[in-house]
């Protein structure tokens, strides 16, 4: 059960290549068993990528942006008790932006989504092909809701592997 529990995902991303596709093309930064993910949608007019949260086939795009060619640290925190999922963007050790979705906005249903041991990183959302052109680093999955303080403490620091709730770490 993914949405009946707290979880957090962290990833560094740099959409640095010029071949990222046409305006409006969506890329999934990560996807947990087709149940939950973070997406980037190319905004050609502003040479940036807009972030979104995805539940099943439903994606909510935000105004949170990552300029092409720049590294950002992304954190997605689901707080089951509050019924919210928050996207944070961190640059140079400071939380720059945040967007909050309710479970109803993301259509989390009854909270009983079953998660298999399958995580997809960086693929084209519509075709599920590994076509993301850029860089990802430091994928982290926690079985708890990270606080803003936790996010800033973890930013730009390799993890020891023994952090509370750390379930998956891909340095």
Image (cartoon, helix red, strand yellow):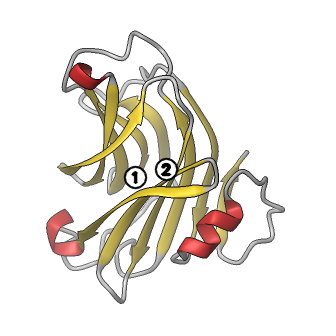
Q: Position of residue 97 (x, y in %)?
A: 40, 56
Circles 2 and 1, Cβ within 8 Å, touching? The answer is: yes
Of the image marks 2 and 1, the number of the one nearer the N terminus: 1
Is 32 displayed left or right of 95 in the figure? Answer: left
Q: Is residue 91 above or below residue 88?
A: above
The residue carrying mark 2 is: 118
Who's the residue at 36% across and 81% down the image? Answer: 4
Residue 169, by quadrant, is: bottom right
The residue carrying mark 1 is: 33
Who's the residue at 37% across and 51% down the image? Answer: 37
Circle 2 Cα neighbour tier, 10 Å, few/some/many (<14 / 14–19 / ≥20):
few
Q: Residue furthest right?
A: 160
Q: Position of residue 68 (x, y in %)?
A: 43, 24
Q: Position of residue 80 (x, y in %)?
A: 37, 83
Q: Nearer the viewer, residue 77 or 111?
A: 77
Is 91 displayed left or right of 170 in the figure? Answer: left
Per the model, the C-alpha gap separating discs 2 and 1 is 5 Å
Q: Nearer the viewer, residue 63 or 32?
A: 63
Who's the residue at 39% across and 75% down the image? Answer: 1
Element under disc 2: loop
């Amino acid at each position: 059960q993914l949405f009946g529990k707290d979880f957090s995902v962290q990833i560094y991303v740099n959409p640095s290549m010029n071949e990222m596709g046409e305006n409006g093309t969506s890329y999934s930064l990560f996807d947990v068993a087709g149940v939950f993910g973070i997406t980037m949608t190319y905004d050609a007019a502003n040479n940036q990528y807009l972030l979104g949260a995805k539940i099943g086939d439903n994606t909510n795009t935000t105004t949170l942006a990552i300029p092409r060619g720049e590294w950002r640290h992304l954190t997605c925190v689901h707080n089951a008790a509050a019924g919210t999922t928050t996207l944070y963007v961190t640059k140079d050790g400071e939380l720059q932006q945040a967007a909050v979705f309710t479970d109803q906005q993301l259509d989390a249903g009854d909270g009983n989504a079953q998660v298999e041991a399958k995580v997809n990183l960086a693929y084209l959302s519509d075709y599920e092909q590994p076509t993301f052109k850029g860089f990802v680093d430091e994928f982290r999955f926690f079985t708890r809701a990270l606080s803003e303080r936790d996010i800033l403490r973890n930013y730009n620091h390799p993890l020891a592997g023994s952090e509370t709730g750390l379930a998956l770490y891909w340095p």
